[in-house]
Amino acid sequence: MGVRTVTRVHRLSAISSSRILVAAVVLAVSAPVGTLSPGPVPSSAAAPAPVADTQRGQVPALRVRTVVRGLQHPWDVQQAPGGRLLVSERDRARISVVRNGKRRTLADLSRLVWVSGETGLMSLAVDAGSRTLWACHGSARGGTHVQVSRWRVDRRWTRLSGRRTLLTGLPSTSGRHGGCRLMLDRGSDALYVGTGDAAVGTNPRTLDSLGGKVLRVHRRTGAPVPGNPFAEASTARRFVWTYGHRNVQGLAQRDDGSVWSVEHGSDRDDEVNLLVAGGDYGWNPVPGYDESVPMTDQSLPGEQQDAAWSSGTPTIATSSAAWVRGSQWGALEGTLAVAALKGSEVLFLRFDAGGGLVSVARPPRLQRLGRLRSITSARNGDLLVTTDNGARDRVVRVSPR
């Protein structure tokens, strides 16, 4: 699917879901195998009655296997050829290759990466065919900020070379709200970049700031992608796809081409958003950095895009997402798996074709791993998950039994 087609899907999907916050139906999964059933509506829901779950069925028992241990704050996990996995560690600024349970260092980037608070070596993206690797990381070169770098990988996946700075100047102050999630578009040469607002109130809705945005750039050149809402501008806004975000740490592309984001709320309302080109998602914590304002402030001028799902109060610190693929998943096939740090769980959210929320499932088996940072869909349909407990962290593989 080309860039123009993807854009059209976004716009059509958003028409049916824009400005409607659908209340979540919490599906209590009381055992590893069971039938999905409706539960209570979250306290934040002030919206039409929830859509009935028409996709009830058996939730499979889940198998959780440890892939590698001994990590520290692993931020992302991505597949590479030959059964390899690539794992980034935020504070160590290290990319590891994991194969058959054994870990070796692909690259020590400690001289390149600026580490402070929530910022360090973060998201990875991998194109196995061209042996290209992208990473989003803090950088102290030219002032503390966040940037996206690109490398080539040798045939044996043992060495990086030819580093190029693809995108730079993503704002950062103390390291708080540094983002940063990468996602390769399946239908074009676009690379999506989810960013944080750096805890600066004016960044999210200032179009020439790259903070608090989802950006879209050419994966090889770093140029703005034709079809971006402001692609003809001469300033930084030419990279902007959506704006008005707080801290985007999850991006996932549905089979229909639509792109969804996951971001952290303040003391309420973590959000899952269906992205529409040029959309304003309503985070505007000014004057100063006033975190008491709504995540989606409908009192702002213009049109703000409501969340497809919101946590209400309290937040669970949603950190990443992946679409669940494969009939082996039973009633969970086609859901959006969302990992949570503070909540220490995985939510499986079902949305209809127009982006309306249908159901939420919370398997107890995935509530025993502690804080969860990244969730990725493997080629065979398994889910790869990184824990983020700070010590003795690991990567686990989740599959139906």
Image (tube, grey):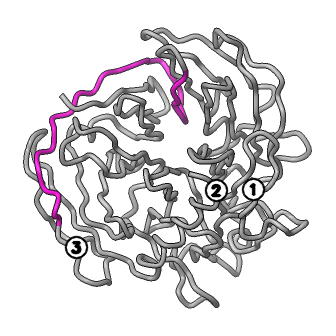
Q: Earlier in the sequence, mark 2 or mark 3?
A: 2
Determine whether 23 is above or below 176 in the image. Answer: below
* 185 versus 299 height, above or below: above
- Whole-angstrom CA distance, mark 2 to mark 3, is 31 Å
Residue denoted by label 3? 51
Residue that appears at 18% across and 43% down: 330
The residue carrying pointer 1 sits among few (fewer than 14), some (14 to 19) or many (20 or more) residues within 10 Å by Cα, namely many
Which residue is more in the foreground, 56 or 189?
A: 189
Separation of residues labelled 1 and 3 (CA atoms): 36 Å
In the rendered image, residue 114, in percent from the top left (x then y), is placed at 76, 37
Q: On the picture, is 188 further left or further right than 390? A: right
Please report the residue visible at 24 percent of the width from the left and 47 percent of the height from the top.
332
Q: Which residue is mark 1?
A: 225
Q: In the rendering, which numbered label is found on residue 91?
A: none
Q: State the image coordinates of residue 180 (x, y, percent, origin top left).
A: 63, 48
Q: Nearer the viewer, mark 2 or mark 3?
A: 2
For residue 82, side relative to residue 185 (left or right): left
Q: In the figure, residue 281 lies in which quadrant?
A: bottom right
Mark toward the start of the polypeptide (1 vs 3): 3
Q: Residues within 10 Å of mark 2 (few under 14, many from 20)?
A: some
Mark 3 Cα-neighbour bin, 10 Å: few <14, some 14–19, many ≥20: some
Q: Residue at x 68, y 48 (%)?
A: 190
Which residue does the numbered mark 2 point to in the structure image?
A: 3
Callout 2–callout 1 Cβ contact below 8 Å: yes
Q: CA distance from mark 2 to mark 1?
A: 9 Å
| Label 1 SS | loop
Mark nearest the camera among 1 and 3 is: 1
Mark 2 or mark 1: which comes first in sequence?
Answer: 2
The three-letter amino acid code for the residue at tag 3 is Val
Tags 1 and 3 in contact by the CB under 8 Å rule? no
Magenta-drawn segment? 53-80
Residue 293 in sight: no
